[in-house]
Image: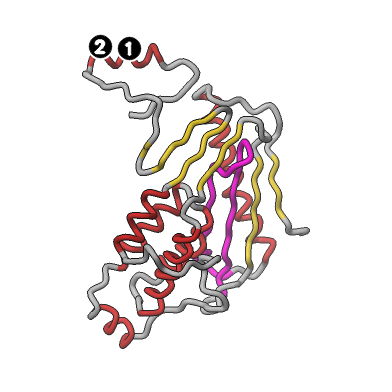
């Protein structure tokens, strides 16, 4: 159990009355995320998890690359023949992509877009998708130490950014939407997704995205205040690049 707040000692004492507990504070590992607490800052990373992935797939000493996406290459569904040939290899692709999906949602927002691209083809997998996964591992091999860094001295305001890439899917012309928010100079949540329907207006896509983002920001603001862990003094700043 992880406990946080300004004064949690009384809570711990009440729990001890009902249950036998072991206090191992301060926390240094939670749900596979390594926590480093230093003066005025906290860092979160999953380097140990990445190392285990590289070891599992025999990529410990692979040649590293600088981007998670294969340059100038668009993924597409595998043909029936490609799918059958890949299935005969016996590779558990769902487990593989699930591992990097966990990374992308916990401490590695730089993987969000490429993971989303792979997840949409789980029913039509081929060798090209496996090569894209190995490409991600090569990227992680060179960037395994990256994570989230929160500094108390950085801007304490809640700032968010949003953008929509209208009709960018080369197969369906569906739009891709994405947003992120940061507090104390580092990301606290992020999201990227492909719209299920074709939109005839880039303005409409931008408004959909902003509605989703603002509802998330208001929920987070209210949660922080109710938990008495952070009180926002200034209005939330949202940056969006669409003039319409």
Q: Position of residue 155 (x, y in %)?
A: 68, 35
Q: Is residue 189 magenta?
A: yes
Element type where label 1 sits in the image: helix
- Real-space CA distance between mark 2 and mark 1, rounded to the nearest whole angstrom: 7 Å
Q: Which residue position holds label 1?
A: 13
Can you tell which quarter of the image residue 17 is in? top left
State the residue at coordinates (46%, 70%). Answer: 63
Can you tell which quarter of the image residue 231 is in? top right
State the residue at coordinates (25%, 78%). Answer: 87
Q: Position of residue 39 (x, y in %)?
A: 56, 27
Chain part drawn in magenta = 173-198
Q: Is residue 48 magenta?
A: no
Element type where label 2 sits in the image: helix
Question: Is residue 90 shown above or below 28?
Answer: below
10 Å crowding of disc 2: few (<14), some (14-19), many (20+): few
Question: Is residue 163 shown above or below 221?
Answer: below
Q: Nearer the viewer, residue 224 or 15?
A: 15
Left or right of 201 on screen, residue 176: left
The circle drawn on residue 138 is none
- Do callouts 2 and 1 mark residues in contact (Cβ within 8 Å)? yes
Q: Nearer the viewer, residue 208 or 180?
A: 180
| Outermost front residue | 61
Q: How is the image coloured?
A: secondary structure
Can you tell which quarter of the image residue 131 is in? bottom left
10 Å crowding of disc 1: few (<14), some (14-19), many (20+): few
Q: Position of residue 49 (x, y in %)?
A: 36, 51
Q: Main secondary structure of the magenta part?
A: strand
Q: Which residue position holds label 2?
A: 17
Q: Nearer the viewer, residue 23 or 90?
A: 23
């Amino acid at each position: 159990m992880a406990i946080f707040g300004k004064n949690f000692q009384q809570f711990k004492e009440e729990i001890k009355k009902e249950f036998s507990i072991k206090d191992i504070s301060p926390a240094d590992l939670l749900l596979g995320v390594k926590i480093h607490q230093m003066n005025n800052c906290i860092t979160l990373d999953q380097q140990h998890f990445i190392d285990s992935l590289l070891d599992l797939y025999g990529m410990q000493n692979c040649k590293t690359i600088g981007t998670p996406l294969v340059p100038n290459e668009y993924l597409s569904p595998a043909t029936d023949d490609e799918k059958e040939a890949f299935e005969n290899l016996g590779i558990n692709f769902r487990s593989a992509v699930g591992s990097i999906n966990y990374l992308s949602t916990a401490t590695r927002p730089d993987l969000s877009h490429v993971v989303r691209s792979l997840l949409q083809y789980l029913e039509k997998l081929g060798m090209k998708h496996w090569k894209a996964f190995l490409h991600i591992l090569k990227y992680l091999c060179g960037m395994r130490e990256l994570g989230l860094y929160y500094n108390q001295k950085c801007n304490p305001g809640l700032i968010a950014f949003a953008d929509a890439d209208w009709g960018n899917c080369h197969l369906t012309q569906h739009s891709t939407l994405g947003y992120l928010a940061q507090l104390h100079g580092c990301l606290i949540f992020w999201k990227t997704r492909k719209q299920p329907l074709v939109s005839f207006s880039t303005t409409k896509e931008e408004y959909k995205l902003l509605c989703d983002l603002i509802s998330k920001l208001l929920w987070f603001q209210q949660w922080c205040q109710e938990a008495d862990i952070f009180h926002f003094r200034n209005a939330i700043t949202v940056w969006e690049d669409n003039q319409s």
